[in-house]
Amino acid sequence: MVAIVAGAQTSVTALGDGSWQVQKTGGADGHFGAWAASAEPIAGDFVLRAEDLTPGNNLLFGVAADPGASAGYMDLTHSCQFYGAEFYVYELGVYRPPIRVHSGVAWIARLAGVVSYRTGPDFASAPIAREVPADAAPLFFDCSIARAGGTIAVRFEPPGAWMGAPRPPRPRIDLTL
């Protein structure tokens, strides 16, 4: 189990099933000054699940090489943003279009050298929003919360829980003449 620890202006509560609740407890509403991170880096493959627990939330979560670099989101190597009902993908603080509607649950996975971003209640059936090549460097969980009282539940899925998960079907183009 990956332990999550509170940073500035947050509280972290273990939920008992390997999940952690992270809530912004101080600072100005709309300011990305509240953060939490994992106590240890994650090496190798992982599947990170995050559930938005606050309607109208504004936060970014993901993984970073150095979670202590800042309280903001510019240092998040791979991240997703819950902003109201919208879901955004960021890499090192750079937005990667398009905007998507989220279901309240999003996933970031590093499997076999590829990072994928998904949104949907179930990892196996959640459509892939974006995929990029990834290195195997250890990464820490990291998040930055702007909304006062904004709360998420995060969990690294146990090994094997996602092994062999089928990919959602992708559209095929037939070039037969």
Image (tube, rainbow, N blue to C red):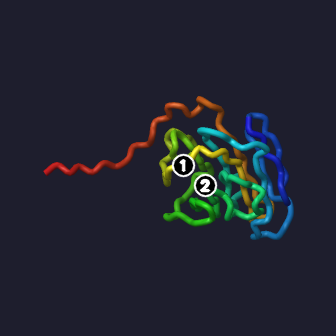
Q: Which residue of the protein is positioned furthest toward the left in this rendering?
A: 177
Q: Which residue is mark 1?
A: 134
Q: Are marks 2 and 1 in contact (CB under 8 Å)?
A: yes
Q: Against 172, is 45 above or below?
A: above
Q: Which residue is mark 2?
A: 78
Query: Which badge, 2 or 1, is on the more N-terminal residue?
Result: 2
Residue 97 visible in the shown view = yes
- Residue 72 occupies which quadrant of the picture? bottom right
Q: Alpha-carbon distance for marks 2 and 1?
A: 10 Å
Numbered circle sitting on residue 77: none
Residue drawn at (49%, 54%) of the image: 130
Residue 67 percent across, percent down from the top left: 74, 55
Residue 65 percent across, percent down from the top left: 68, 52
Residue 56 visible in the shown view = no
Residue drawn at (62%, 52%) of the image: 104
Label 1 neighbourhood size at 10 Å, few (<14), some (14-19), many (20+)? some
Residue drawn at (50%, 34%) of the image: 165
Amino acid type of the residue that numbered disc 2 sits on in the rendered structure: His
Quadrant (top left/top right/bottom left/bottom right) for the N terminus: top right
Question: Count the marks: how many?
Answer: 2
**SS of the residue at dot 2?**
strand
**SS of the residue at dot 1?**
loop
Label 2 neighbourhood size at 10 Å, few (<14), some (14-19), many (20+)? many
Residue drawn at (57%, 55%) of the image: 102
Q: Against 92, is 47 above or below?
A: above
